[in-house]
Image (spheres, rainbow, N blue to C red):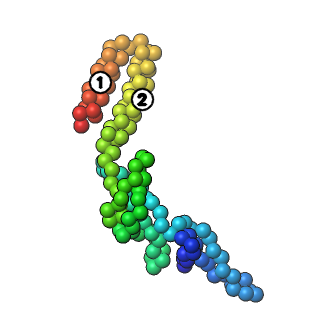
Amino acid sequence: MFSVENGTVFEVEEVDTGIQNAVIKKWYGKEMKLEKVEEGNTRIYKWVKFDLDNGDYVDDITNTDLINVDGVDYTPVDGRVETDITEELKEKKLEELKNQYLQLIRDARDLGEDAEVTRLQQEYQQKKTEIENA
């Protein structure tokens, strides 16, 4: 069982101590909170509110409180703001690719495999270009 007091959600448990019934309240979370989820190339910031009937958070499509994303305030539509993260995901992929190939190239260089170093460098450049142009 849950209760909401002053914007805070508590999990409520009644315990029979043998002498009397005690009520134990455990902090569960805020009644309203901002969630961030990623779907494909989109990051979604959305207001959710705690639903006492099902004991979980649900989308609050009526909430029009501003949502701050990277220092900019946005007015949500249906309780949410969506941002395109395509470039951010590309940068992350490029960094992972770079780290992977740097290690492979170092290992090949340490073994004196000059042909393998050249092949890996060319392969890296090709994959890098593919990611940048995607």
Q: Quadrant of residue 120?
A: top left
Q: Is residue 84 visible?
A: yes
Residue farthest right in this picture = 19
N-term mark: 2 or 1: 2
Q: CA distance from mark 2 to mark 1?
A: 13 Å
Q: Is 65 located above or below residue 130 in the figure?
A: below
Q: In the visual, does 10 lie left or right of 69?
A: right
- Residue marked by disc 2: 99
Q: What residue do we see at 47% from left, 71% from top?
A: 50
Rendering coords of residue 77 (x, y %) = 32, 62
Q: Amino acid at mark 1?
A: Gln
Crowding at dot 1, Cα within 10 Å, few <14 / some 14-19 / many 20+, comes out as some
Rendering coords of residue 76 (x, y %) = 35, 60
Q: Amino acid at mark 2?
A: Asn
Task: Identify the secondary structure beneath mark 1.
Answer: helix
Rendering coords of residue 53 (x, y %) = 45, 79
**Which quadrant is home to the N terminus?**
bottom right
- Residue marked by disc 1: 125
Q: Is residue 59 visible?
A: no
Q: In the visual, does 12 lie left or right of 45?
A: right
Q: What residue do we see at 45% from left, 69% from top?
A: 49
Rendering coords of residue 73 (x, y %) = 40, 53
